[in-house]
Image: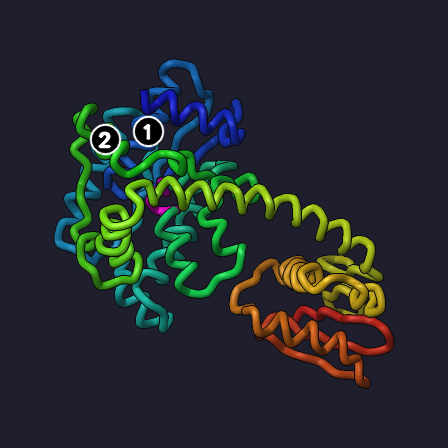
Amino acid sequence: MLEEKLLKTITEYNLIQKGDNIVIGVSGGPDSMALLNMLINLRKENKIDAKLIVAHINHGIREEAEEETKYVKDFCDSNSIPCYIKREKVEELAKEQKVGTEEAGRKLRYSFFDEVANKENANKIATAHNANDNAETVLMNIMRGSGTSGLKGIEIKRDDKFIRPLLKITRKEIETYCEDNKLNPKIDRTNLENIYTRNKIRNELIPSIEKEFNPNIVTSLNRLSELLNEEDEYIQKVVENKYKDVLIEEHLGNNKLEGKEQIILDLKKFNKEEKVIKNRLIRYTINKATGSMQNIEKVHVSDIVKLCENNIGNKFLVPNKRIKVFVGKGKIFFIKEV
């Protein structure tokens, strides 16, 4: 029954097409093991036609890590699934990169997924994020004061490459599926420790809300996420059309201008737009110029809008190390810094 629900999500969002090569991130936990097992069964029943490849990372943090790695490898071998394994000391990596252990682990995972995808000529990367993960993300972003982009939660599909087929399935459904199919997944005990914000939301905040206010809070937050995703898709199309209207020149990649990659917008046309469109245009242009919105915060966007509205002489801002925004001669220059 849960496999049919998964298939419905795959079909509705066009997550898997015939001939896809899919790298699946598998930790050995309930979520990833349920996803892998369901995809194997759907393929056996000829309901999907795709090559499945597993990527597993041993983070070298817990004593049980080697046992989990063996469990994943044995499961893949018994189902004739290619399995790539990477061992890394994530805590040491975090210290080297001067970031938190969670962030270091996330970067490592996605880097490894890309590495495996390149080796296997895979066109999709599947992760086992579920409905509860999405609800936790939305709550976390609410508490951080996020805008609508944060309230969208986890995207079910991104760049036609990253897919989250379990996003409409709850953690309880997954745990029941694992029991029914005798998968005996490995449990990461650190998920039960309330050290990280996400764990506190998962183990304390959501159960409290379910008990005292709304027993269906996970469903409610996922409904909010879905509605905002639909609205965001519409607004994004509007912004793309506005971008074409205010664009003067675009010099990216091999089409550089004087050795610089930059985008030039019409200042007068830009200033005529509503504030919400201006904000979106700035974010869209920076992302187009640099390929990322990392470290670009609301205050940076607001400062650029003010710079454009004031239009006093030749002024510039450097919101981060990758981009410089210059206003002068009736134009806005978004210059990529090397």
Residue extent of the magenta highlight: 128-134
Q: Residue at left 45%, top 21%?
A: 48
| Residue 316 is one of the magenta-drawn residues | no
Q: Position of residue 74 (x, y in %)?
A: 21, 32
Is any atom of residue 338 visible in this view?
no
Q: Badge 1, how many Cα within 10 Å: few under 14, some, many 20+?
A: some
Q: Which residue is mark 2?
A: 75
Q: Residue at left 45%, top 50%?
A: 153
Question: Mark 1 and 2 residues: CB-CB less than 8 Å, in contact?
Answer: yes
112 left or right, relative to 276: left
Q: Residue at left 57%, top 41%?
A: 230
Q: Badge 2, how many Cα within 10 Å: few under 14, some, many 20+?
A: some
Q: Secondary structure at mark 2?
A: helix
Q: What is the CA distance from the residue labelled 1 to the residue labelled 2? A: 8 Å
Instruction: Indicate whether 160 appears above or below 40.
Output: below
Q: Nearer the viewer, residue 13 or 92?
A: 13
Q: How is the image coloured?
A: rainbow
Which quadrant of the figure has residue 7?
A: top left
Q: Nearer the viewer, residue 16 or 151?
A: 151
Q: Position of residue 298 (x, y in %)?
A: 56, 69
Is any atom of residue 174 visible in this view?
yes
Q: Which residue is mark 1?
A: 81
